[in-house]
Image (cartoon, coloured by chain):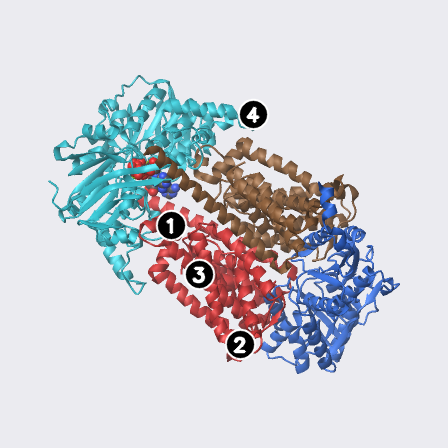
Chain colours: A blue, B brown, C red, D cyan
Amino acid sequence: GSEDSANTSGGGEAGANPKTKHKIAYVTNGIDPFWDLCAAGVRQAENELGGVECEVHFPPKGLADQKSILETLLAKGIKGIAVSPIDADGQTKFLNEVAAQTKLITHDADAPKSDRLVYIGTDNYKAGRALGQLVKEAIPDGGEVAIFVGRLEQLNARQRRQGVIDELLDRPSQALGQIKFDEVAKVFKGEKYTIVDTRTDNFVMDAAKSNAEDAITKYENLACMVGLFAYNPPRCLQAIKEAGKLGQIKVCGFDEDDALLQAIKDGHAYGTISQQPWKYGYESVRMLKGILDGDDSVVPASKFIDVGYKSVTAKNIDEFWAEKRKMTALGAKKD
Amino acid sequence: MNKNTLGILGLFILIFGITWASNENFANGYNMTNLVKWSSLYAIMGIGVAFVIITGGIDLSIGSVIGLVAALMALAIKQGWNPTLTVFLLLGLSLVIGLIHGLLITKVKLQPFVVTLCGLLFYRGISRWLTDNQTMQYPNTEGLDSFFSGKVGLFGQFSLPSPLFFLIVIAVLAAFFLNRTIWGRYLLALGNNEDGARYSGIQTDRLKITAYVICSFLAGVSGLLFAYELDSVQPAQTGEFYELYAIAAAVLGGCSLRGGQGAIFGVIIAAAVIRLLRNSINLVGISTHLEFAIIGLVILGGVTADELIKRIVAKRRTAQVNAAKS
Amino acid sequence: MNKNTLGILGLFILIFGITWASNENFANGYNMTNLVKWSSLYAIMGIGVAFVIITGGIDLSIGSVIGLVAALMALAIKQGWNPTLTVFLLLGLSLVIGLIHGLLITKVKLQPFVVTLCGLLFYRGISRWLTDNQTMQYPNTEGLDSFFSGKVGLFGQFSLPSPLFFLIVIAVLAAFFLNRTIWGRYLLALGNNEDGARYSGIQTDRLKITAYVICSFLAGVSGLLFAYELDSVQPAQTGEFYELYAIAAAVLGGCSLRGGQGAIFGVIIAAAVIRLLRNSINLVGISTHLEFAIIGLVILGGVTADELIKRIVAKRRTAQVNAAKS
Amino acid sequence: MPDAQPLLKISAIGKQFPGVRALHNVDLTLNQGEVLSLVGENGAGKSTMMKILAGVHTPDEGTIELDGRAVQIGSVREAQKHGIALIHQELNLSDNLDIASNIFLGNEPHKYGVLDRKRIYEESAGYLKRVGLDFPTDTLVADLTIGHQQLVEISKALSVDARIIIMDEPTSSLSKKESGNLFEVIRDLKSQGIAIIYISHRLGEVMDLSDRVAVLRDGENAGELVGDEITHDAMVKLMVGRDVSQFYNRTATPPGEVVLELDRLRTPVHPTVEISFNVCSGEIVGIAGLVGAGRTELLQSIFGVTPAVGGTMKLEGKVLNPRTSLDAIDSGVVLAPEDRKRHGLVLEMSVRENISLARLRQDQKVGMIDFRGEAELAEETIVKMNVKTPHAEQITQYLSGGNQQKVVLGKWLAMNPRLLLLDEPTRGIDIGSKQEIYRLMEDLAASGVAVLFVSSEMEEVLGMADRALVMHEGAITGELPRDQLSEEAIMQLATGKKAAA
Ligand SMILES: Nc1ncnc2c1ncn2[C@@H]1O[C@H](COP(=O)(O)OP(=O)(O)OP(=O)(O)O)[C@@H](O)[C@H]1O
Ligand SMILES: Nc1ncnc2c1ncn2[C@@H]1O[C@H](COP(=O)(O)OP(=O)(O)OP(=O)(O)O)[C@@H](O)[C@H]1O
Ligand SMILES: [Mg+2]
Ligand SMILES: [Mg+2]
């Protein structure tokens, strides 16, 4: 009886409806406020560009969850997916499976060996070097530097850290694909700068703060604290404030937590490197829409769209913060 | 099949039906295959923990054991060890872990919750340390890859994933062990009344240790399955939280945390319910932020309904007795 | 102070000494103030969960309750609610949460592990959903800020952090309640022998509910303290895992998971041990990757030593009894 | 004799449990200052009736009147307010607390909830004196023997200012001396106008104490006896519905070869005391002694659950050194333990599963359960032991005490033991079942099994033992052959006076 019902159902009509929006999905690598800013960019593009309807998924616990979300999206017949692969190399095979069934692009982290159509991202190593540059500006006379990060198992975290270390030790630049990573439990002594420690907190907020506190206790001559994940610099700032060493220990960070931006404005922190996350979201939607509309010109020959990064210091903080506010407000939409 | 299992089966069918009705793609081959795959993975963990729960114990460490085994496998391959040999070594390691748990619990008489909580912390820390907290890839050691995460096509996009075969073997053995062998009977007896079992000549310590060994062993198997399924390991994350899902599956599937009660089939269905819920949330398009809340509610609803049904049955039985007597 | 508490105090002094010896900065005012602060925060959670453990129950939900309260506070302030009023509302909410747990456990007769596991999932999901999973900053509502996370300077960099005052008040009340009031007595009695307590006219259900209410309430208080301490909330992460630390502190501090046993002072010292370990790991310069492993080992070592000491004491007592008899 | 206005009047009480009708249409009256005994077989509903009075259970139907006024007793609190105190059949102390705290548990003197510790310790000392318990009031209950714990329970009942005190088998774990002490207390209470409801399976005590006896059978009133009507035979007849004559009819046969031989055995609780004796095939040997004399400990050491710390044992000439019960069972030694519910049975399992629990190992086929054999064994045993159960699948929890004990025995008989150890085989068991258990012991002895039993009931030892060993503080103080058995001789040895050998 299925043939009869197929005739009478309006299935054909709906498929031909030109107003039907492309259903696409934006998949992150976890739950983090960073991704909410990206989602803001997604919403913005959705509103501005029209013709697409985008789901945003935050896999709660790592790779298994990301994989099953992608599988479900495929099952659902989604037309395009932008994903930030948690482990690009390990996932290549699976990503190819995905790419075979839908339009796949990567953002934030690339899977260069996979069949993804385009990668939207920044060079985290370069961004790390830029962060090292900020540290140099913050403490031009040199001194002890400690690094704080959530987890070093994420490639971007390792790249950033390596960038900072290489820059401070004035090592030559490494190519993104072939970076040699330094050990974690090691002190790196350069001419002016010494990287005394790297502490991880596993995303536990109180650990992030107490790591900062303990570093202040341990390294009496600490000159600069570098936070590689969004929540790290604000925790460092709190610890410094409570130790009565505001201004004495400089802070340089990554990302754009409001507390950090405020501190830059107030002169308590030196600066931060922003990847302008909304651009990931915006560009991802723009790419997918273009690809789905059959407009191949959106994809550059290099298959790489560099959204770049921005060094934010007291000089440009007002302008940057205004942009962030605008983006957040623009994209805010309950999911 | 007992009454408990019927309840959870009903829940499964209900959610299955609702999801199907609200999304036509739900029943396609691709999605079904995936659902079967993830359910199998969860069910294997759940069966392991069910054995421990039947003895009246608990195992909080399995998530970390999964992480450890997965990490060590990747590490060993990287170091150039023979993959197949490593698999056996790691399964051996998980047996040893279970043995240690069991010995601490029976001989030193520590509480299972405490021992396995320490295990949870310890194995996770060791994984992170050994791998320097780096994500590790699984190279294509072809044989193992398709053994642990391959598929046998059926028709269309319907296929049978490797973990299902593992589950079938494990479930059949487990159910057989529990219901048909003397040791299974002993396990149930000691879960109900440990002293009573001991006075009947049952070597309760050995059996309890066996239960922890089975549990850790199946966690080890799961670790390999998960790792090969994902082709990669994150030492800080892989397996995190799984103990809670496994325990939830065991409880929802009819194991009482008081011990002495358990049904393998129920655990499998319960694991499938948990996976189905997640699938359903993603398919129907409910905010992923709500996922945990919904799973929590459904489990709570499930066990509450179970409890209330039991009471009604008991009441009816009283009424029957009265009717018969007067 | 009982014997159990002496053991954990010894452990504390040992680690304290070792750390001090290996890092001279350890004993400076800044570090001591921090150590006291974090220990107080953990101890408050630990005391809450101790009440539940004394009844023979467990509460896995407190980490999620902490996250929920912290998230709602930020949300309310953002929405322009009166902060002080919100504090009272949220403390009220945590009371209600405890009440619901208690009712489900006593009236519907669900197992504490199951109820609070569902709570763990549910509250976490709700926090994420309500806040749309956004990190929320705590604006400087000055009064509350210094109330929950202020400091009273002593000399040099030594000062007394707010959480310490909270802890003192809570600990004194808790110890008084447990050891000096009839309800504390009832709690201990019912944890040991629930039927016996009921036959003595003790309203066991009410008391058990009270224990869950106290636990959730203290989790609520901790939620506010943590949030103000960190000046921000990550709905998906704040409080995650804390239940395990709190339970570990309670167990290490002398509460038996079998119920009927508990000492507030022990829990406080045990919480301090856990925090001290972390501090020590950072100061001595051990890889943070190993943190979990070390904490796990120390807890296991602590409870093992405790168990072995108990046995030796029991043996000596037997010997004495025999000596007295013959 | 009853006054116009009884203190307590219970009418037409009914109570159902899932699958069990415990009480049906029960009437009972109680007058001021009288001792009313309640007797009946296991499961007759005695404890249930008393739990209703104490507010533990609520009745499904019927009324309770106190001083002529109908009352609802919805909780233990309310019962206490009405002046009703119940000493439960099972011990209900919190052994993490001390004696004083337990005596006042639920009834503490307090000010705004704050304990009045001084009063608690002072006043509890007085109660201890009354029941003759000579311990400091801050002794942990966990450190007391069962018998002493029972005395704490009794002190607890005295501490609530009760008009009605109910004692549910208070002497089941008391020795003769301690029981005597309790009877003094009861008479004293009675003289103060307090009414007592006394439940016991020891009919001798009942005859001595009671003004009136009410008998329950199958949850219904079976009759009442007053004054001179209270005789052993009359009570038994009402309880079981027929005459039970010839209670003990042991006729010893000459013993066979030595089955069990103990040579200077030392148990963990009394590691300095050496125990030596023999038990022969076909012999029934009783072990008498006061509570806490170490009899249970001895049986447990022979059975391997608490392995001996020194000395040697031989079973039929072969060295027996069991480290676990399994070792003992494999050599042909089995034990029906004192605490049936905790050690004897897996209460949540069916009669079939309990009966086969020990035998499974023998009948296995490469580890697999022989289900058919198991079912046959269960059916056979139920018939042989005369277990009253609707079917083999009944959960043992729902059986009466006597039938539970028969299941325990059935489990062990299926093992064809060489030596049967019985610890208080008839504790808390009604008269009909008792008789069947005695018969069984004799049958086994006749078939050549050696039987060693521990009993605190003097008549049981006198009636059943071919030979009695008497223990005191872990040591065997004497051995009495059947012709020298007497109450006085046993008491002498049990209190530590060595027999002039
Ligand atoms: N809580 C309960 N749930 C179910 N059945 C019960 C419960 N308590 C008692 N029963 C059943 O009710 C009946 C009466 O039990 P009760 O304990 O009153 O007997 P009893 O006369 O005190 O026996 P005994 O001499 O062995 O103490 C028995 O069949 C018993 O199994
Ligand atoms: N597991 C144990 N741990 C410590 N002491 C024990 C233990 N079991 C028995 N005892 C003690 O050993 C002594 C002998 O106890 P046992 O139970 O063997 O005596 P019994 O003569 O069988 O008395 P009952 O009639 O009460 O069973 C008592 O003082 C008792 O408190
Ligand atoms: Mg009774
Ligand atoms: Mg005994």
Q: SS at mark 1?
A: helix
Q: Chain of mark 3?
A: C
Q: Is residue A259 left or right of residue B254?
A: right
Q: SS at mark 4?
A: loop
Identity, as a three-letter code, of the amino acid under mark 3:
Val
* Mark in the foreground, 2 or 3: 3
Residue C213: assigned label: 3
Q: Chain of mark 4?
A: D
Q: Are the two marked residues, 2 and 3, in contact with CB atoms closer than 8 angstroms? A: no
Residue B256: assigned label: none
Please report whichever mark, 2 or 3, sits nearer to the chain's N-terminal start: 2
Residue C143 locus on image (x, y percent): 51, 79
Residue at label 1? C194
* Mark in the foreground, 4 or 2: 2
Label 2 packing within 10 angstroms: few (<14), some (14-19), many (20+): some
Identity, as a three-letter code, of the amino acid under mark 2:
Asp
Q: Is residue B274 left or right of residue D195?
A: right
Identity, as a three-letter code, of the amino acid under mark 4:
Lys
The image shows residue D387, relative to residue B260, as above or below, that is above
